Amino acid sequence: MAATIDESRALRASPAHPDGSLTEAQVTRWRTQGFTLAHGVLPIDLVDALRSEAVNHFPKPGSPEAADFTDFGSAGAFTFPATVAAFNDVTLHHRLLDAVSSLLDCPVEDLRLSQSDLWPKYGHDSGARKSAIQDNADQRIHVDYPNHSLAHPTPWNRPEAVEMIVYLSDFAETGGATAVVPRNGTRDPAYRWPIVDSPGIGDLRYINDREAAEDYFADQRPELAAWRQSLYQREQYTAFKRGDVLFYRHDTWHRGTPMRAGTLRLVQNITYRRAQAEWISTLHTGWAWQAYRDSKYLERMIAAASLKQRAVLGFPQPGSDYWCAETLAAVAARYGMFGFDIAPYQRAVAAPEKPVV
């Protein structure tokens, strides 16, 4: 597929409410079809600040460094928690937390962050691919749960997590639309159960490139090859603009499509899960690993965070059994010099909630 898209299958973002919250139609689409593309969830000045930092960090499109750039992620520079404040601010933005809360229909405090990284993707000439099998330009249709979860997604009406792509670029300039397959009702053959007919699941070989993957299926699993072609025939394509957010699921069929040669597309990938879904792994090194840095940026971030932002990182909430006189004093000693307010935790210990009778 070229960097242009069939207009009849183009997806354009619908506006969120003026306060950045998702509309009822956007929430319904995510819950029924598996995705929704929204604009206005994040402040555009924050998006632009993050984009500027990333553009200055990564190789320029068309440069020799860009031609050799093969890392899918950002090699730590833009992996949460990062030294780039705008990246962390997007990750923990209260509007994103509220959006996930509305999609999963649970309190923000019951969410946990499991992924946040920024990915650059470069557009190359079609003949410049170095590895046809694992090439990232024109991906095979797939679902994301295998490298997020040790188990299998729960039934459709019991979603466990929300994935997001925050677009920092414009499709009109870069191409690289995300293709998604909308779910059409409870008996949709595209979403048959279990979801195991994708490269890398079970004993199927992991192949990223679309052509190579479908050749593999035609040779090894011919009974699935035609069915997988039906997924491509139903694709819709995100004609994204800077600041748009694609909310989707671990069990949504989707893929990346080719970009315009000589361009750079930047996106931030974020995942939040339900706190009790412990089988969904954190993709990165634990947040506490960033302690001890001379800048103390992790400690400062924890101290400045809201109670909800700390909660989604796994920090013990007010009312948790963790808190007692000793731990209150100890945490205050660790973070107090950075402005950490221990009072909400003290109040919860002093006046615990009475049980409902």
Image (tube, grey):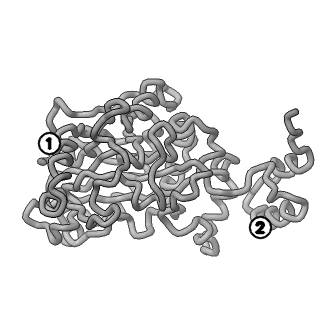
Vertical side of 131 occupied by 270: above or below: above
Task: Name which quarter of the figure residue 62 lies in.
Answer: bottom left
Residue 254 pos. (x, y %): 29, 47
The residue drawn where x is 18% and y is 56% is 210
Residue 334's tag is 2
The residue drawn where x is 34% and y is 63% is 202
Residue type marked 1: Thr
Out of 162 and 346, give the one closest to the viewer.
Answer: 162
Whether residue 214 is visible, yes or no, is: no
The residue drawn where x is 7% and y is 64% is 127
Vertical side of 197 occupied by 97: above or below: above
Crowd class of label 2 (few under 14; some 14 to 19; many from 20; radius 10 Å): few
Which residue has dot 1 on it? 4
**Residue at the extreme left:** 127
Out of 39 and 286, give the one closest to the viewer.
Answer: 286
- Relative side of 132 to 264, left or right: left
Residue 289 pos. (x, y %): 59, 72
- Relative side of 347 to 146, left or right: right
The residue drawn where x is 48% and y is 24% is 24
